[in-house]
Image: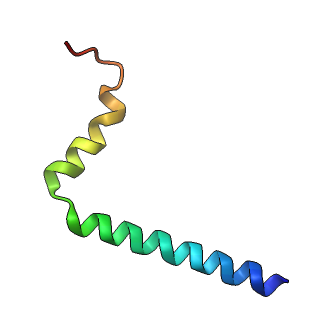
Amino acid sequence: MTWYLFIGDMLVTAFMIVLFVWLSLRSTRAQFDAVARIPLEDEERRG
């Protein structure tokens, strides 16, 4: 049973790494900067 949990954890970890690399490769610096500002601008009212 322990091996099933270990293998499952490794699969989830591999998925998260692949997702991170995929998102990093298809995004530009400007998009990263915009996403990083979201928590700082969430209280600012626009319009």
Question: Residue at the bottom extreme?
Answer: 3
As drawn, 6 above or below 28:
below
Residue 36, image x, y percentages: 29, 43
Relative to residue 11, is residue 42 drawn left or right? left
Residue drawn at x 21%, y 65% is 26
Task: Indicate the quadrant where residue 29 lies.
Answer: bottom left
Front-lying residue, 45 or 36: 45
From the viewer's perspective, tell me whether residue 39 is left or right of residue 30. Answer: right
Which image quarter holds the C terminus?
Answer: top left
Tell me: residue 29, above or below residue 11.
above
Q: Residue furthest right?
A: 1
Q: Could you tell me which residue is drawn at 61 percent across and 80 percent down?
A: 10
**x then y, percent, for residue 12:** 58, 72
Residue located 28% across and 44% down the image: 35
Q: Is residue 4 left or right of residue 38?
A: right
Quadrant of image for the N terminus? bottom right
Which image quarter: residue 2? bottom right
For the point 31% across and 35% down, the residue is 38
